[in-house]
Image: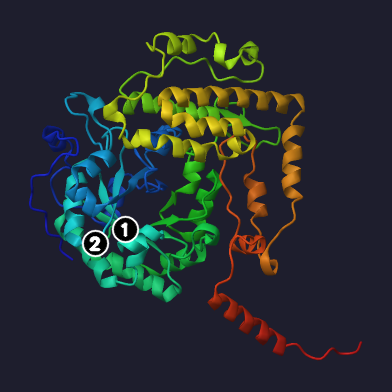
Amino acid sequence: MAVAQETQQPVASPAGDAAAAAAAAPPTGPKLHGRAFYESIGSPKFIVAPMVNQSEFAWRMLSRSFLSAEEKSKMLAYTPMFHARLFSQDPKYLKAHFQATRPGATDDSRWLDGNPTSDRPLFVQFCANDPEHLLTAARQVAPYCDAVDLNLGCPQGIARKGHYGAFLQEDQELIFRLINKLHTELSIPVTAKIRILETKEQTLAYAQNVLKAGASILTVHGRRREQKGHLTGVADWKMLRFLRESLPPETVLFANGNVLQYGDVDECLAATGFDGVMSAEGNLSDPAVFAKPPAVGEEGREYWRGKDGKGGWRVDAVMRRYMDIIYKYALDTEPPARRPLFVPGDDTAWLTADAADEGDERGKKRRKTGSEGSAPPPPKKQETSPNIVAMQPHLFHLLRHFVSKHTDVRDMLARARKTGLAGFEEVLDAVERKVAEGMLEYDRTDGQSFAEELKAVAERPRETADEAESSMEALIKCKRPWWVAQPIVRPLPSEALAKGSIKLSKKDLVEKAKKEEGEGKEVKEPVAA
């Protein structure tokens, strides 16, 4: 299909800086499509998923920060999902969610979302059910990103109520019009993210419709719309392999689902044959999920490796990186001076100091003057920054296993937002102390403190309905000490059913009864030996 070039329209800069918008505009010329476009942005195979209020600039920066230069060239990130109608009609909504430039700045520091040197390639995702609203919103972000993505995968109740996301999948004609509108009238490519349907044939027809409409890249979440919460279950990589083998080989495909650890990325690529792997929850629990672990002996202070050779990035190290990005980019200030991260063998005198009276220079300055090295409260103009708003939810994800053990830190984190960055600095100080104590205990016991914890997990009874598959093996595989960033392993639906967290629907009960009745009829009379 020939692609009509977009007539250049005046586009309002999200930050009100028209000159910056012009500077950021993509080069003129024919719009690339499909694999040619994919190769033009570096053929990325690591993809940070679009997550509502959770894949904002600071988190994308953090996720990229763990990668080597070579790995960074292979990473693509998505913005959070934005509502196209609100984005196109409500200036306050736009300003609160997408901040491409800082008004008045003249150097590279003016860039936030879509920073040409540190936040590319970047796709901006919208949910929509009206082609005109979608096009208007897409034109506003086109100067700051490489493509615009249509969300067709959100399974939440708000998407049902608003008629968008996965609740458009019954209206294939509307989906075609939404994508084709951008394909024919937007200056940059359009992509889409879908969920699988009940059958292979239905899913293939769905994918073909999206691609025929003009999507350059198709992301497929290997779960159906109803697979959420306790029903999330395991993504179907076999369905994804079927799509790969059924669609033209030049089709660019991204897989989503089942990526918990670094090793899962290559496993997914091998199983599906897709071009790239997208991670959502895995990335929230460990923003370094796409980073190759350092070699033995090259861990430094940020990466911990146990006596069994398994390891991960320390949560205090990850939180420090994240906080420093917030200072530098969201608050336009230098991060406070920090002591080196503790490793066993360092002086432990600071651990015995009362946190309230610690002689650390940074703490003194915070209490007395609020000058350099302090954690100033965010200025009023930054209170609506998506980077500031997302901090507390991000830290609860990152520290999920940590705060399950240290509930006092959980309570500190719950209160932190009220006092701004100073409150989060107090949480960081407590996290650093607990991590140091945990590592010292590990060394004192020659690793037995964690070995006993792992043994207790392995000895838990497998509680599943109808002797179905258990998530316990995945839990044991992913389990690390609480001071290490690690995934959250969800119980499988059969386990949730056995525990009473969910109940079978009337439809499922009828189908189960029919199945049991059929199996009963097949039982033959016992034969004497």
Q: Residue at x 30, y 23 (%)?
A: 332
- Residue 429's x, y, as percent? 53, 22
The kind of residue on which mark 1 rests is: Ala
- Residue 100's x, y, as percent? 24, 36
Q: Are marks 2 and 1 in contact (CB under 8 Å)?
A: yes
Above or below, 330 relative to 225:
above
- Mark earlier in primary sequence (2, 1): 2
Q: Which residue is mark 2?
A: 179
Secondary structure under badge 2? helix
Q: Is residue 287 visible?
A: yes
Quadrant of the image occupied by residue 166: bottom left
Q: Residue at x 41, y 19 (%)?
A: 375
Quadrant of the image occupied by residue 73: top left
The kind of residue on which mark 2 rests is: Ile
Q: Taking 67 as reference, is 349 left or right?
A: right
Circle 2 Cα neighbour tier, 10 Å, few/some/many (<14 / 14–19 / ≥20)? many
Quadrant of the image occupied by residue 195: bottom left
Residue 147 or 285: which is nearer the viewer? 285
Q: Taking 512 as reference, is 26 left or right?
A: left
Residue 132 or 199: which is nearer the viewer? 132
Q: Which residue is mark 1?
A: 192
Image quadrant containing the N terminus: bottom left
Q: Taking 37 as reference, is 293 left or right?
A: right
Secondary structure under badge 1? strand
Mark 2–mark 1 Cα distance, whole angstroms, equals: 8 Å
Q: Residue furthest right?
A: 529
Q: Is residue 292 visible?
A: no
Above or below, 163 relative to 430:
below
Residue 450 or 214: which is nearer the viewer? 450
